[in-house]
Image (cartoon, helix red, strand yellow):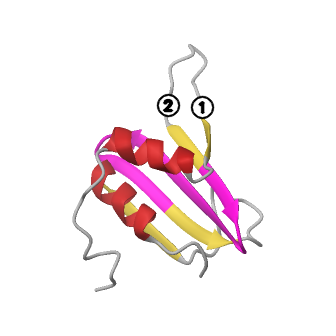
Amino acid sequence: MSSAEAVAPVFDIDTGLQELVARGYQFVHPADERGEVLAVVGVRVHDDVVDVVRLNAEDDVVATRMPGTEENIFEPERWLWRRRGEGAQVLTEMLSLPDAC
C-alpha cells in the first residue's frame, strides 16, 4: 500500500475543488447538445507531469498523473498514478501527491 492509499479523506468535494483551484488547476465543464454538464474536468501542468481530475459524479471521480510527454491527456498511454472512486477519497489522495515525481 502506498502512502497515498493510506490517506483518510480529509477534503470534502467542495473543499478539494477549492484546493485544486488554489494549486493552479484549470477547469472545463464539457456539456451535451442540450447544454447539460457531463463532467467537471481539471488539468494542471507542472514540472514534468500533467495532473487531470474528472468528476462525473460525487461517487465517480477519476484522477491521473502522467508524464508531460503524453499526447492525449484524456486517454494517456502511460500514467504514473491513477485512482477512481468516491470524490472525497480521490481528491484527498490527489492533493497528497508531491508536486514532482
Q: Position of residue 71 (x, y in %)?
A: 77, 64
Which residue corresponds to mark 2? 38
- Predominant secondary structure, magenta span: strand
> Is residue 58 rendered to the left or right of residue 76?
left
User: In front: 15, or 6?
Assistant: 15
- Magenta span: 43-63
Contact check, label 1 and label 2, Cβ < 8 Å: yes
* The residue positioned farthest toward the top in the image shown: 34
> Is residue 28 rendered to the left or right of residue 20?
right
> Is residue 62 rendered to the left or right of residue 33?
left
Q: In the rendered view of the protein, which quadrant contains the C terminus?
A: bottom right
Q: Position of residue 62 (x, y in %)?
A: 44, 55
Number of the label disc, if any, that sits on residue 85: none
Which residue corresponds to mark 1? 30
Q: Position of residue 73 (x, y in %)?
A: 67, 59
* The residue positioned farthest toward the bottom in the image shown: 1
- SS at mark 1? loop
Does residue 19 show up?
A: yes
Question: In the image, what residue type sits under mark 2?
Answer: Leu
How many marks are shown on the rendered structure? Answer: 2
Question: In the image, what residue type sits under mark 1?
Answer: Pro
* Number of residues whose C-alpha sits closer than 10 Å to that of mark 2, classed few (under 14), some (14–19) or many (20 or more): few
Which residue corresponds to the image point at 51% horizontal and 52% vertical from the top-left? Answer: 53
